[in-house]
Image (cartoon, grey):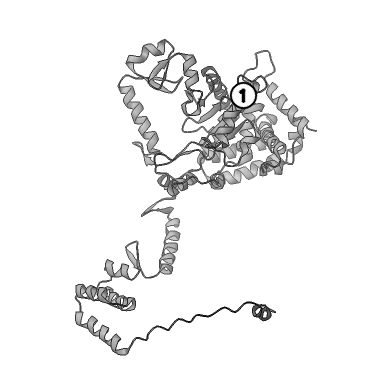
Amino acid sequence: MLIASLLLLAPVPIVVSAPPAPVSASQDANLEAKIKAAGADIAKLLELAKSCAKDSDARKVYRAVIALDASHEEARKALGHQLYDGKWFESLTELTKYKREEAARMKEKGLARFKELWVPESELPFHAMGWVKDANGKWASPHVLAREKEDAERKAAGFVFRADDNSWVAPSDVEHWTALRWKCGEEWVELAQANEFHSKLENAWELVGEHFTVISTCDWAGADAARWYAEKSYPELVRIFGLAPARRPEFVVLASLDQYNAAAGGTRPLLPDAEGYSSLHGAYFADLAFDMSTPPAQFFGCGVSFWDRKDEKLRGWGPYWLRWAAAQSFVDAIDPSWGFIGEVNQAGVIGTSTAGFWAEKRIPRWLRYGAASYVERYMKDPEAAADANPWGLREFAFGQLQRTGGLRKLDEVFAFALDLTKLESSARLYHEAGLVVSFLLDGAPGDQPLAAAHDAFRNALKAGDAKAISASVATLQKELSSRDSALRKFAGLQ
């Protein structure tokens, strides 16, 4: 059948090239005589090689050169040899084999290659990100060190730090501060003008709290309230994970849904959401937010929410969503993806996929998102009056789950497979993960095995031991699964 098929094809003319002219014995002998005449004079041999009309003749002469001087660079390069680790390799296969064996030897020593250096594997991401060690021997971004140097110089010059807009006020401008004016660009203005100036994301307010920095296009009062709400969530996040970030996490609160949508995925998104999950909730994590303008690239991934304080229907949701956003920034600060950020730095481009970013995480997504959901709607109500029920938020959350489908199988919660073709189910998955965290923290106070599993996870996370973290997560999930019935009873889902 194959032959029959081939016969049906139109005939194709065959062009046969003329065979190469054979090398005569006299030509070859003549080249050998010239090489012999040059003897050990490398300069003459190089001159001879360059005069050869045929590449094969030139290569023969260059081989004669390296027979005299094995490290002769010009001859080696002319032969296509590769210099690596102080050695010349005659083929790519030979070089690849050497590198593979070398990497295996170095890995046993805990080393990895970065450009021409062998560095500790734990330090490889920092080299790739372009970070440097500070005066205390700790890794830091050059951009952060530059800002810290500027701050130190301002402080020495008598400037005063103002947390309410993350600025340094010159001694000569303190009178403006005391008069409650705000510096916008080069001009000191009243609050109404400052609110207008900071209503655009590129000029957003920055308010520094004890544990968080909020970046907001809301009016100053709204940004200040966001700072307060975020601070209330901080102790609960430490309770969940057992450690605090080394730096103050930043999160964003935008003033409207339009700003939120534009920031996440507009024509020129400033805080891109690679996976499109901004459509599931009133908050998301900006996993593709990089500043590539000045190397090394800076990662600005953070939780993003919106709080439309002018919309009667949306206004009440703002405090919930911003706590969710703050929690996302908190968790990313204790579980960073340095390897992914280093790869972006090395490539010099951002790309569109964050699969590597999420694959690097040690905290599972269900627990990361569950923590965000917990501080959003399951923790004690920070605004509850002294004589009011402090668990009103949790009861509201339980009620929503009861009305919208309850709790799916715990294995499905732990898998945490968000699906943008199933918006309602995926949005509910956030809150189901929050319920699991709520039970872990508050639903079984006398359960020692569950508490021990939680402690083991927190201790492993604090130690930074990836294998121990993975094992402790598996144990924690197993303990929670064995309490499926108690968990559902806790939420009134039975």
Q: Residue furthest right?
A: 494
Q: Which residue is at 50% across, 26% downward?
A: 200
Amino acid type at circle 1 is Gly
Q: Is residue 350 above or below residue 75?
A: above
- Judging by the rendered image, the residue that carries numbered circle 1 is 318
Q: Nearer the viewer, residue 51 or 466?
A: 51
Relative to 290, is 284 on the left or the right? right
Report how many numbered discs are placed on residues in the image.
1
**In the picture, residue 35 is in which quadrant?**
bottom left
Give the percent coordinates (x, y) of residue 58: 30, 76
Whether residue 212 is visible to the viewer of this picture, yes or no, is no
Give the percent coordinates (x, y) of residue 101: 44, 63
Crowd rating for badge 1 (residues with CA inside 10 Å; few <14, some 14–19, many 20+)? many
Q: Give the structural element (helix, strand or loop) at label 1.
A: helix
- Tell me the quarter of the image containing the C terminus: top right
Q: Nearer the viewer, residue 491 or 8?
A: 8
Give the percent coordinates (x, y) of residue 362: 56, 43
Q: Is residue 456 above or below residue 257?
A: below
Give the percent coordinates (x, y) of residue 137: 36, 39
- Tell me the quarter of the image containing the N terminus: bottom right
**In the picture, residue 263 is in which quadrant?**
top right
Whether residue 297 is visible to the viewer of this picture, yes or no, is yes
**In the picture, residue 134 is in which quadrant?**
top left
Q: Which residue is at 66% across, 19% downward?
A: 312
Q: Is residue 444 above or below residue 119?
A: above
Relative to 421, is 178 on the left or the right? left
Q: Which residue is at 45% across, 81% downward?
A: 17
